[in-house]
Image: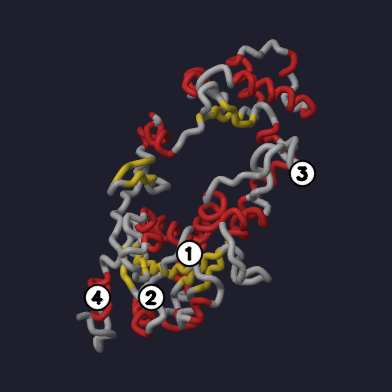
Amino acid sequence: MLSGVKVVEICGIGPGPFCAMHLADLGADVIAVERAAPANDAALSTEGYVLNRGKRSVVADLKTAEGRELVLALIQDADALIEGMRPGVMERLGLGPDVCLQRNPRLVYGRMTGWGQSGPMVQAAGHDNNYISLSGALYYHGTPAEPPSSAITVVGDVGGGALYLAVGLLSGILNARATGKGTVVDASIVDGSAHMLQLLLSTRRKGFITGERGNNIHDASHFYSTYRCADGKFVTLGSIEPQFYALLLEKLGLTEDPRFARQWDRERWPELHRHFEELFATRTRAQWCALLENTDVCFGPVLSPEEAAGHPHLAARGVYFEAEGHLQAAPAPRFDGKAMAAGAIPRRGQHTGEIMAATNASHPSGIWKTG
């Protein structure tokens, strides 16, 4: 779907590489500019790095004139650039937005950070959980009795970061193709994860959440929660709507129990939640699946990625696959009912020679010697 879109990625960690992989999954030509790493330095190794799948890899030292010139040559006909450095680093390397947009006025310059490009915290180090805690996105996670617990990387790095950067880049590319003018995309995880709360905030008028942790629908209610089964595994319920709640009570043999008649009686939620905890602990996850899965109860087992890969529904859709010794998730979304094909994982610098040669060929005077 993104055939004809060229993206240059200044490789970093986390959300930037994920965004670039996502665009490559969708058909973009992504050139990953990686730094050389000692063969014995496992911490810097990207061999088999699944976030590099579908990309072409070139090695360059951006602190040298040659490395800088390679990036400038690559972006000359590129649609977008992705970088995830702290604010000011790309400028110090001589590859900031002003320099790059002077070389290619149509370029969409994507900047991926946790705190953003402005504000008093932009130079502070941070990670996924720090960004979503500050933005408010972590606040409601978990039960009232426990500290908030994040879904590792999902809410911040990917949801509030990489995917917002992808939307920003594609919006910028559409605008550049219409106007001939590039732009700088400031994608920060604090912005994106806060924006993701909009759906949750919209439920306040329905009474699903309040301004405080506890006594909210998520995990505090008995009908929207996660339960431990007899085998130590877990299942989830999401029986919010009255018809789904009624079916849940029917399946559990509780239709005639007066304690469960008033679904939204918050004062009784703790008692009813404890009852459900005791009830779900009497059967294994597989037994609860046999009773509740594929019904309108709104039910799901909590699966590991490996278990999910073998689940009949996900297997039928080909959501996971194994390649090159790694479990991977298939590209998403689908187009005309078909998933995009996932690309191969390149070796670090695998395409350096061909990319430098092609770049030289596009400049009559040549940029550097290629050996």
Furthest-left residue in this view: 371
Q: In the image, is 310 to the left or to the right of 251?
A: left
Image mark for residue 212: 3
Give, as a three-letter code, the residue at label 4. Ala
In percent of width and height, residue 121 lies at 65, 68
Question: Is label 1 in contact with label 2 (beta carbons under 8 Å)?
Answer: no
At mark 2, the secondary structure is helix
Give, as a three-letter code, the residue at label 3. Glu
Image mark for residue 358: 4
Question: Is label 3 in contact with label 2 (beta carbons under 8 Å)?
Answer: no
Give, as a three-letter code, the residue at label 1. Leu
As measured in the structure, the alpha-carbon distance from the residue carrying label 4 to the one carrying label 1 is 25 Å
User: Disc 2 designates what residue?
Assistant: 75
As measured in the structure, the alpha-carbon distance from the residue carrying label 1 to the one carrying label 2 is 14 Å
The tag earlier along the polypeptide, 1 or 2, is 2
User: Disc 1 designates what residue?
Assistant: 169
Quarter of the image with the N terminus in it: bottom left
At mark 1, the secondary structure is helix
Residue name at image x 25 percent, y 86 percent? 366
The tag earlier along the polypeptide, 4 or 2, is 2
The tag earlier along the polypeptide, 3 or 2, is 2
Quarter of the image with the C terminus in it: bottom left
Give, as a three-letter code, the residue at label 2. Ile
State whether residue 188 is above or below residue 208: below
